[in-house]
Image: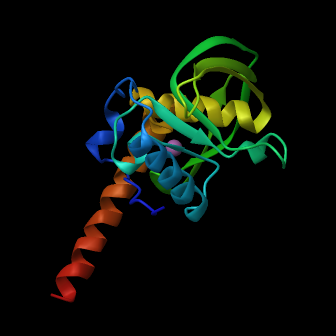
Protein backbone atom coordinates (compact mmCIF):
# COMPACT_ATOMS: atom_id res chain seq x y z
CA UNK A 1 0.00 0.00 0.00
CA UNK A 2 1.10 3.53 -0.61
CA UNK A 3 -0.01 6.98 0.39
CA UNK A 4 -0.92 8.99 -2.70
CA UNK A 5 -0.63 12.74 -3.13
CA UNK A 6 -3.87 14.61 -2.42
CA UNK A 7 -4.76 17.17 -5.10
CA UNK A 8 -5.87 20.59 -3.95
CA UNK A 9 -8.12 23.21 -5.51
CA UNK A 10 -7.71 24.60 -8.18
CA UNK A 11 -6.28 21.38 -9.69
CA UNK A 12 -8.46 20.85 -12.80
CA UNK A 13 -8.91 17.13 -12.08
CA UNK A 14 -11.24 18.09 -9.21
CA UNK A 15 -13.69 19.68 -11.67
CA UNK A 16 -13.93 16.69 -14.04
CA UNK A 17 -16.90 14.37 -14.12
CA UNK A 18 -15.71 10.91 -13.08
CA UNK A 19 -15.61 8.03 -15.54
CA UNK A 20 -17.60 4.87 -14.85
CA UNK A 21 -15.64 2.08 -13.14
CA UNK A 22 -15.80 -1.09 -15.26
CA UNK A 23 -12.82 -3.18 -14.12
CA UNK A 24 -12.49 -4.62 -10.60
CA UNK A 25 -9.15 -6.38 -11.02
CA UNK A 26 -6.07 -6.64 -8.77
CA UNK A 27 -4.87 -3.19 -9.84
CA UNK A 28 -8.23 -1.75 -8.77
CA UNK A 29 -7.91 -3.50 -5.39
CA UNK A 30 -4.51 -1.86 -4.93
CA UNK A 31 -6.04 1.51 -5.79
CA UNK A 32 -8.72 1.02 -3.11
CA UNK A 33 -6.07 0.00 -0.54
CA UNK A 34 -4.01 3.09 -1.42
CA UNK A 35 -7.10 5.28 -1.07
CA UNK A 36 -7.79 3.80 2.37
CA UNK A 37 -4.22 4.41 3.52
CA UNK A 38 -4.24 7.94 2.07
CA UNK A 39 -7.55 8.75 3.80
CA UNK A 40 -6.32 7.53 7.20
CA UNK A 41 -2.99 9.34 6.84
CA UNK A 42 -4.60 12.67 5.88
CA UNK A 43 -6.61 12.13 8.15
CA UNK A 44 -10.09 12.25 6.63
CA UNK A 45 -13.39 10.38 6.89
CA UNK A 46 -13.84 10.06 3.13
CA UNK A 47 -11.86 10.26 -0.09
CA UNK A 48 -12.81 10.37 -3.76
CA UNK A 49 -10.56 9.02 -6.53
CA UNK A 50 -10.46 12.55 -7.99
CA UNK A 51 -8.54 13.69 -4.93
CA UNK A 52 -5.60 11.45 -5.82
CA UNK A 53 -5.75 12.56 -9.44
CA UNK A 54 -8.02 9.89 -10.92
CA UNK A 55 -11.36 11.16 -12.27
CA UNK A 56 -13.40 8.00 -11.60
CA UNK A 57 -16.88 7.37 -10.20
CA UNK A 58 -15.33 6.06 -7.02
CA UNK A 59 -15.19 7.05 -3.36
CA UNK A 60 -14.52 5.53 0.03
CA UNK A 61 -15.87 6.51 3.46
CA UNK A 62 -14.62 5.44 6.89
CA UNK A 63 -17.57 3.34 8.08
CA UNK A 64 -16.68 4.25 11.67
CA UNK A 65 -18.63 7.49 11.18
CA UNK A 66 -21.71 5.22 11.37
CA UNK A 67 -20.54 2.83 14.10
CA UNK A 68 -17.09 1.80 15.38
CA UNK A 69 -17.24 -1.74 13.94
CA UNK A 70 -18.49 -0.71 10.52
CA UNK A 71 -16.04 -1.62 7.73
CA UNK A 72 -14.74 0.83 5.11
CA UNK A 73 -17.41 1.76 2.61
CA UNK A 74 -16.39 1.53 -1.04
CA UNK A 75 -18.81 2.99 -3.57
CA UNK A 76 -18.25 2.82 -7.32
CA UNK A 77 -20.66 4.35 -9.86
CA UNK A 78 -22.96 5.80 -7.18
CA UNK A 79 -26.45 7.03 -7.89
CA UNK A 80 -28.92 8.70 -5.52
CA UNK A 81 -32.07 6.64 -4.90
CA UNK A 82 -33.76 8.93 -2.39
CA UNK A 83 -33.04 11.76 0.02
CA UNK A 84 -34.94 13.48 2.78
CA UNK A 85 -34.78 16.54 4.98
CA UNK A 86 -32.25 19.33 5.20
CA UNK A 87 -29.37 19.99 7.58
CA UNK A 88 -26.88 22.85 7.64
CA UNK A 89 -23.63 21.88 9.34
CA UNK A 90 -19.89 22.39 9.24
CA UNK A 91 -17.91 20.63 6.56
CA UNK A 92 -14.31 20.49 5.41
CA UNK A 93 -12.50 18.99 2.44
CA UNK A 94 -8.99 17.54 2.09
CA UNK A 95 -8.73 19.33 -1.26
CA UNK A 96 -9.55 22.70 0.32
CA UNK A 97 -6.94 22.92 3.09
CA UNK A 98 -7.60 25.00 6.17
CA UNK A 99 -11.18 25.70 5.23
CA UNK A 100 -14.38 24.82 7.04
CA UNK A 101 -17.81 26.21 6.26
CA UNK A 102 -21.49 25.49 6.69
CA UNK A 103 -23.04 23.53 3.85
CA UNK A 104 -26.68 22.57 3.38
CA UNK A 105 -27.17 18.83 2.77
CA UNK A 106 -30.01 16.30 2.83
CA UNK A 107 -30.48 14.87 6.34
CA UNK A 108 -30.66 11.29 5.10
CA UNK A 109 -29.85 9.71 1.78
CA UNK A 110 -29.86 6.33 0.06
CA UNK A 111 -27.45 5.54 -2.75
CA UNK A 112 -26.93 2.56 -5.02
CA UNK A 113 -23.57 1.57 -6.43
CA UNK A 114 -21.02 -1.22 -6.64
CA UNK A 115 -18.69 -2.42 -3.90
CA UNK A 116 -14.95 -3.08 -4.35
CA UNK A 117 -15.72 -6.41 -6.04
CA UNK A 118 -18.22 -4.91 -8.45
CA UNK A 119 -21.18 -6.31 -6.54
CA UNK A 120 -24.31 -4.10 -6.41
CA UNK A 121 -24.92 -2.51 -3.03
CA UNK A 122 -27.15 0.11 -1.50
CA UNK A 123 -26.07 2.42 1.27
CA UNK A 124 -28.36 4.30 3.63
CA UNK A 125 -26.95 7.13 5.67
CA UNK A 126 -27.96 9.81 8.07
CA UNK A 127 -26.03 12.22 10.26
CA UNK A 128 -22.32 12.47 9.45
CA UNK A 129 -22.47 9.47 7.11
CA UNK A 130 -25.17 11.16 4.99
CA UNK A 131 -23.04 14.32 4.84
CA UNK A 132 -19.92 12.37 3.84
CA UNK A 133 -21.86 10.43 1.18
CA UNK A 134 -23.12 13.65 -0.41
CA UNK A 135 -19.70 15.32 -0.17
CA UNK A 136 -17.98 12.36 -1.89
CA UNK A 137 -20.79 11.96 -4.42
CA UNK A 138 -20.22 15.60 -5.38
CA UNK A 139 -16.48 14.94 -5.81
CA UNK A 140 -17.06 12.16 -8.35
CA UNK A 141 -19.33 14.53 -10.32
CA UNK A 142 -16.55 17.14 -10.33
CA UNK A 143 -18.31 19.33 -7.73
CA UNK A 144 -16.58 20.80 -4.66
CA UNK A 145 -18.20 22.12 -1.49
CA UNK A 146 -16.88 25.46 -2.73
CA UNK A 147 -19.48 25.22 -5.51
CA UNK A 148 -22.20 24.94 -2.88
CA UNK A 149 -21.27 28.18 -1.09
CA UNK A 150 -22.62 31.64 -1.82
CA UNK A 151 -20.75 33.52 -4.61
CA UNK A 152 -19.36 35.94 -2.00
CA UNK A 153 -17.94 33.21 0.25
CA UNK A 154 -16.55 31.39 -2.77
CA UNK A 155 -14.74 34.47 -4.09
CA UNK A 156 -13.33 35.24 -0.63
CA UNK A 157 -11.93 31.73 -0.38
CA UNK A 158 -10.45 31.86 -3.90
CA UNK A 159 -8.74 35.16 -3.03
CA UNK A 160 -7.27 33.61 0.10
CA UNK A 161 -5.98 30.58 -1.83
CA UNK A 162 -4.34 32.80 -4.45
CA UNK A 163 -2.63 34.80 -1.73
CA UNK A 164 -1.36 31.60 -0.06
CA UNK A 165 -0.01 30.35 -3.39
CA UNK A 166 1.75 33.65 -4.01
CA UNK A 167 3.41 33.47 -0.58
CA UNK A 168 4.47 29.90 -1.25
CA UNK A 169 6.01 30.93 -4.60
CA UNK A 170 8.01 33.63 -2.75
CA UNK A 171 9.24 31.10 -0.21
CA UNK A 172 10.45 28.85 -3.00
CA UNK A 173 12.15 31.76 -4.73
CA UNK A 174 13.93 32.64 -1.47
CA UNK A 175 15.59 29.24 -1.22
CA UNK A 176 16.49 29.16 -4.88
CO1 LIG B 1 -13.67 16.77 -0.23
Q: Residue at x 76, y 16 (%)?
A: 85
Query: Which x, y percent locates residue 60?
Result: 57, 40
Looking at the image, which is closer to me, 1 or 98? Answer: 1
Q: Residue at x 23, y 72 (%)?
A: 169
Query: Which x, y percent locates residue 102?
Result: 64, 39
Q: Is residue 81 above or below residue 57?
A: above
Q: Is residue 145 left or right of residue 164?
A: right
Looking at the image, which is closer to me, 97 or 34? Answer: 34
Query: Which x, y percent locates residue 97?
Result: 48, 58
Q: Is residue 36 above or below residue 78?
A: below
Is residue 94 something one can see in this rendering?
no
The answer to which image quadrant residue 21 occupies is: top left
Farthest-out residue, bottom: 175
Q: Is residue 83 left or right of residue 1?
A: right
Which quadrant does the C terminus fall into? Answer: bottom left
Q: Residue at x 33, y 34 (%)?
A: 15
Amino acid sequence: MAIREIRHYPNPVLAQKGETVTVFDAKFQRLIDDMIETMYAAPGIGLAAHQIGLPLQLFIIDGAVQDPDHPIIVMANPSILSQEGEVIDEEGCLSLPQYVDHVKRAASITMAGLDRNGKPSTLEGNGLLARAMQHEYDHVQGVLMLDRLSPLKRSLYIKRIKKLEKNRAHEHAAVG
